[in-house]
Image: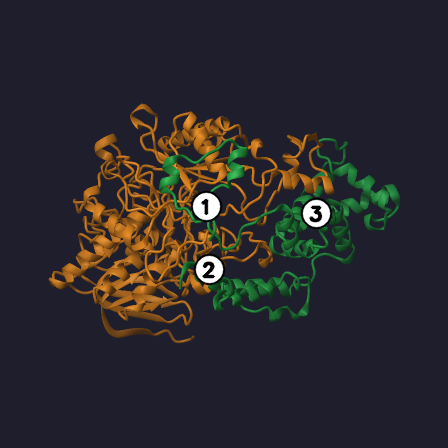
């Protein structure tokens, strides 16, 4: 490559979609099935779990035995390309900020590896300002989104149980799997201290729902992505059938640079760099739909500057990039002596927990305004790199088969110890709602570009006492549950005020949201209640960017619902020639 | 295709056969400085950048010297010897794993190299020989000074830190090998049907599923 040319595609699409994860995959699916012509841009390579998953590989099939690399921070078998760092694509921080930014680069995005935790927001989650005076209410309520949650439950499939909980609404559920042994221990222990434990709600098929996907065969490896499409990944469940309609041109390795506009200030398409040939391209459409992730979509908008949009496209409010927030997270683990020397059997189950705890308390009586849910782990996991690391901290602390030993050691006696402790560990993770604040934001770094010459994001995020107090409460709760089940804390028990009670850095839970939020007031929000830009009527954002607040729920199911809702609106508006 | 057929297809069918065969060609065995490493096949579950990075690691010369590797092998088999249940660390090719992992995780290089030299210097002082050339009794006398963190004498803490690392790398390498997985009794990673905790195990822990659970949860005919 010596001469740089801009190659303009002559075909005009009905929609250009940037990003193929939950938001973009759903938009492509809805639009293509409505007969519209779609160009779907993805910054990473093609990915089909059937061909590309590491499912059912054994630990020894990885030279590093499943340990993480910079390419796969969640381990060598994980189903996500890239993560905290990408070669040639830096991001920066303002002083004191420590946002951790996860970026997937592949068809389907991070949905290939996510936890499949598929929780509806409840009625209160759309109206938090009315309840506690913090942040803002959404311009829509649960009743607006409920029909889409219902459709998605049926289209994609999710298991769970109807519990009649007001703010954890019932859904159209497949049957959940039975709890594992440590989950029965957790349920009993938590129940003794009035903490509810109910079947988890995961988008995994415990029953077959259509001809394209098989039912789960219980290998616990959803994180690797599923070769038989037994769980939800945007790649297998949305992008693949969307492409099969013949209405979608999927362009991979296409790193979006800018939203193009015309003299009237409407979006006309996307300029992108092809990461393989390093040439510059432009594609054009009647609408442009951003779904590149909350921060990437904000970055793209802020980088789309023109005389008409000096602060970036659709940013007359100045709000693009602001109100960036992530779920809170704190964790703890222990060992259950009652489970030492357990009988062996296959307890893989589905990928992830079979039970969880939805938020169960009233924040009016607490020193933090928003709730959290608890996720659980434990049992006989596949041995991978790090397996039983630190036995010297464990084997001197308990009698092993009736015998008190010295810590550490070697030999046949040590081998007995490893067998003795296998499957006795348990862990729990709180995932909660932080407050979306104007002073928590990403912006364009004035000094730094990535290897494609695209200006990069600079972050400015910090937790407030609300989130720190919440983490403190998580830790106290975890200790109570572990104590109640007779477990001994082995990690995460030493956190305190010195480290915000183990509260993870913002961004670390990988639920970025809020940078392009929706609202009725164009001065305070870039998008209206249909995920449509106030300033540019044919520009939409359908990823986590549009969120006003997070809820104490994982956001994917709501991204899917809002994207489906926006996409149906787009189909309707295009038909009516309003856009 | 019914459910059982589809499971079978997954095991023996076109998709997974190639995956399983490819899996057998993983570079772990070749990693110890074999010049043929450029031939490592592209893995369908690796992105291009990963295939390239793995090839670069495989092309590196050996990290450990022959003396160091002999010492690692001896220590590994002291930590995980053959017993009534399973083979030894070297049976499970743990030394090859350690050679690979210090290239993949360079943060282990200095503690391993320095720890091995520390060990040899101790042995030279006391026995006039490097660790690998000491008698078995001398080797065990040395190991016993660093294998028990709570009992270790003054001046032995660096040796304890090294032996802890050596023990952890050996255990991780062993229990993630085919021999070790079988030894510890991990029985998953295979298509099956989760029907809940086995009856006898529920009884052992005085646990039972509630009627609500039995009614709402997915269950499978045990004969299937």
Residue position marked by numbered label 2 in the rendering = B7
Query: What x and y, as percent, mark residue A248?
Result: 28, 68
Q: Residues within 10 Å of mark 2 (few under 14, many from 20)?
A: many
Chain bearing tag 2 is B
SS of the residue under disc 1: loop
Q: Nearer the viewer, mark 3 or mark 1?
A: 1
Residue position marked by numbered label 3 in the rendering = B85
Q: Residue at x 60, y 64 (%)?
A: B24
When asked about the image quadrant of residue A271, the answer is bottom left
Q: Residues within 10 Å of mark 1 (few under 14, many from 20)?
A: some
Q: Are marks 3 and 1 in contact (CB under 8 Å)?
A: no
A208 horizontally vs A134: left or right: right
- Which circle's residue, 2 or 3, is located before the other in the chain? 2
- Which circle's residue, 3 or 1, is located before the other in the chain? 3
Q: Nearer the viewer, residue B92 or A4?
A: B92
Q: Nearer the viewer, residue A324 or A184?
A: A184
Q: Nearer the viewer, residue A560 or A258?
A: A560
Q: Quadrant of the N terminus of chain A?
A: bottom left
SS of the residue under disc 3: loop
Same subunit, labels 2 and 1: the answer reads yes
Query: What x and y, as percent, mark residue A491?
Result: 54, 35
When asked about the image quadrant of residue A130, the answer is top left
C-alpha gap between disc 3 and disc 1: 29 Å
Q: Residue at x 27, y 36 (%)?
A: A164
C-alpha gap between disc 2 and disc 1: 16 Å
Chain bearing tag 1 is B
Q: Which chain did the image draw in orange?
A: A
Query: What x and y, as percent, mark residue A66?
Result: 55, 53
Residue farthest to the right, as pictured: B128
Q: Residue at x 26, y 50 (%)?
A: A561
Residue position marked by numbered label 1 in the rendering = B195
Q: Colour of chain B?
A: green
């Amino acid at each position: 490559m010596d001469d740089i040319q801009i190659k303009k595609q002559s075909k005009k699409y009905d929609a250009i979609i940037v990003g193929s994860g939950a938001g973009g995959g759903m938009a492509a699916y809805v639009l293509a099935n409505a007969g519209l012509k779609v160009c779907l841009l993805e910054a990473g390579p093609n990915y089909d779990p059937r061909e590309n998953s590491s499912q059912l590989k054994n630990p020894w099939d990885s030279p590093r035995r499943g340990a993480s690399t910079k390419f796969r921070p969640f381990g060598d078998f994980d189903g996500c390309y890239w993560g905290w760092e990408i070669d040639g694509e830096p991001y920066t921080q303002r002083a004191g900020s420590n946002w951790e930014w996860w970026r997937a680069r592949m068809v389907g995005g991070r949905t290939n590896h996510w936890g499949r935790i598929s929780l509806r927001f409840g009625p209160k989650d759309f109206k938090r300002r009315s309840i506690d005076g913090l942040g803002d209410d959404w311009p829509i309520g649960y009743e607006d989104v409920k029909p889409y949650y219902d459709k998605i439950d049926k289209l994609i499939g999710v298991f769970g149980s109807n519990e009649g909980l007001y703010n954890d609404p019932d859904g159209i559920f497949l049957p959940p799997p039975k709890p594992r042994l440590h989950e029965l221990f957790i349920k009993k222990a938590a129940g003794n201290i009035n903490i509810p434990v109910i079947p988890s709600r995961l988008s995994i098929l415990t029953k077959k729902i259509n001809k394209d996907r098989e039912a789960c065969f219980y290998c616990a490896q959803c994180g690797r992505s599923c070769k038989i499409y037994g769980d939800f990944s945007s790649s297998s469940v949305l992008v693949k059938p969307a492409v099969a309609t013949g209405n979608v041109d999927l362009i991979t390795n296409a790193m979006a640079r800018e939203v193009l506009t015309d003299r009237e200030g409407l979006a006309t398409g996307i300029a992108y760099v092809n990461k393989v040939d390093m040439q510059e391209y432009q594609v054009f459409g009647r609408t442009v739909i951003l779904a590149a992730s909350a921060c990437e979509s904000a970055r793209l908008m802020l980088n789309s500057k023109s005389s008409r949009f000096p602060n970036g496209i659709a940013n007359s409010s100045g709000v693009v990039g602001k109100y960036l927030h992530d779920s809170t997270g704190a964790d703890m683990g222990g060992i259950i002596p009652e489970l030492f020397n357990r009988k062996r059997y296959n307890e893989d189950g589905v990928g992830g927990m079979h039970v969880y705890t939805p938020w169960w308390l009233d924040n009016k009586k607490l020193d933090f305004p928003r709730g959290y849910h608890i996720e659980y782990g434990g049992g006989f996991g596949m041995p991978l790199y790090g397996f039983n690391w630190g036995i010297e901290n464990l084997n001197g602390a308990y009698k092993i088969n009736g015998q008190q030993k010295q810590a550490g050691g070697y030999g046949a006696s040590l081998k007995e110890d490893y067998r003795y402790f296998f499957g006795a560990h348990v862990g729990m993770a709180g995932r909660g709602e932080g407050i979306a604040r104007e002073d928590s934001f990403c912006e364009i770094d004035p000094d730094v570009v990535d290897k494609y010459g695209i200006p990069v994001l600079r972050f400015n995020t910090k937790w407030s006492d609300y989130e720190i107090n919440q983490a403190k409460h998580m830790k106290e709760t975890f200790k109570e549950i572990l104590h109640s089940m007779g477990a001994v804390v082995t990690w995460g028990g030493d956190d305190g005020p010195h480290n915000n009670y183990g509260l993870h850095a913002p961004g670390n839970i990988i639920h970025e949201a809020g940078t392009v939020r929706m609202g009725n007031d164009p001065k305070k929000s870039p998008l209206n209640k249909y995920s449509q830009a106030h300033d540019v009527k044919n520009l939409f954002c359908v990823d986590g960017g549009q969120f006003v607040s997070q809820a104490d729920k994982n956001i994917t199911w709501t991204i899917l619902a809002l994207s489906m809702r926006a996409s149906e609106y787009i189909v309707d508006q295009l038909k009516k020639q309003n856009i | 295709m019914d459910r059982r057929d589809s499971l079978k297809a997954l095991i023996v069918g076109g998709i997974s056969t190639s995956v399983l065969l490819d899996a057998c060609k993983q570079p772990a065995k070749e990693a110890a400085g074999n010049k043929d490493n450029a031939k490592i096949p592209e893995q369908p579950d690796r992105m291009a950048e990963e295939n390239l990075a793995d090839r670069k690691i495989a092309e590196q010369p050996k990290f450990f010297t022959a003396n160091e590797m002999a010492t690692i092998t001896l220590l590994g088999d002291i930590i995980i010897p053959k017993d009534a249940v399973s083979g030894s660390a070297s049976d499970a090719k743990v030394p090859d794993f350690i050679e690979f992992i210090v290239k993949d995780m360079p943060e282990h290089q200095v503690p391993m190299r320095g720890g091995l030299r520390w060990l040899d210097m101790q042995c030279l002082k006391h026995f006039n020989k490097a660790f690998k050339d000491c008698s078995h009794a001398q080797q065990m006398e040395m190991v016993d000074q660093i294998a028990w963190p709570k009992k270790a004498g003054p001046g032995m803490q660096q040796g304890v830190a090294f032996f802890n690392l050596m023990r952890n790398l050996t255990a991780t390498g062993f229990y993630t090998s085919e021999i070790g997985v079988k030894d510890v009794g991990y029985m998953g990673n295979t298509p099956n049907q989760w029907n809940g905790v086995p009856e006898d195990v529920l009884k052992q822990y005085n646990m039972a599923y509630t009627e609500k659970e039995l009614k709402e949860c997915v269950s499978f005919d045990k004969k299937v």
